[in-house]
Image (cartoon, helix red, strand yellow):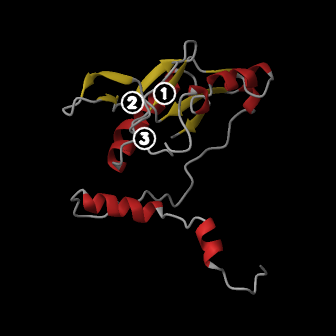
Amino acid sequence: MTTSEPATDSVATTHRSFVSYIDRTREFYAAQGYGKPYRWARNAEVPFAKLAKPLSECRVTLVTTASPLTTAKAKDGVLRGAKAVWSGSTDEPPESLYTDDLAWDKETTHTDDVESFLPIARLREHVAAGRIGSVAARFHGVPTDYSQRRTLEIDAPEILKRCREDGVDVALLVPL
C-alpha cells in the first residue's frame, strides 16, 4: 500500500488506536462521582537542577511507586500496599513488592522481577564501572495518590527530607 491509497479495514484492524490517558482518567473520575474533572499537573518551568558534580561522584537513590504489602486487610478483606511514603535498605532489597493496585499492563507483562522497577543491582554495577559514585543506603517509595496537594505538600517534601538525610545527589524515579 502506498501513502496515497486509503487504509483498508484489514489495516485498521491490525493497528491499535491510542487510548487517551487524559480522557480515560477524566471519565473514570466522573464515573466515581467526582464533580470536577481531574486537573493535570502543569509546570511552566522544568523543576530539575544541573548536577553540582559529575555523575561518577554522585550518590544515587531510587524512588518507586510500588509498596510493601501491608499485613492489615482492607474492609473488603483484600491485602493492600502501604499508602504512605516508606523507605527500604539497598543492602537488603525486597524480593517482592506490592504492585497489584498500580496501573501497568497486567495482560502482557508482570512485576515478578523486582529489578525491573527497583534496579538496585544495576546501580551497583554502575558503581563498579565508575559511572556513578555510590548507591544510597536507602531507596524510597511513594504511594500513587492522585492528589496533587498531597504529592506537593506531604509526599514530595518527605522524600526530599529523606534524600537529604542520606546525602543523595540524584534520585532516579521508577514509577509503575
Can you tell which of label 3 and label 2 is closer to the viewer? Answer: 3
| Residue at the (54%, 17%) spot, across then down | 93
> Element type at marker 1?
strand
Neighbor class of circle 1 (other Cα within 10 Å; few <14, some 14-19, many 20+) is many
Lower position in the chain sequence, tag 3 or tag 1: 3
Quick check: 8 left or right of 57? left
Question: Does 36 appear above or below 124?
Answer: below
Crowding near pointer 3: few (<14 within 10 Å), some, many (20+)?
some
The residue wearing badge 2 is: 85
Instruction: Residue 102: give its label.
Output: 3
Label pair 3/2, CB-CB below 8 angstroms: no
| Residue at the farthest left position | 75
Place residue 75 in its image quadrant: top left
Reading the image, the residue beneath label 1 is 140
**Residue for point 47% across, 33% down:** 160
Which residue occupies the foreground of this view, 160 or 108?
108
Position in image of residue 122 (x %, y %): 69, 26
Count numbered badges in the picture. 3
Identify which amino acid the numbered label 2 is placed on: Val
Question: Where is residue 167, by image quadrant?
Answer: top right
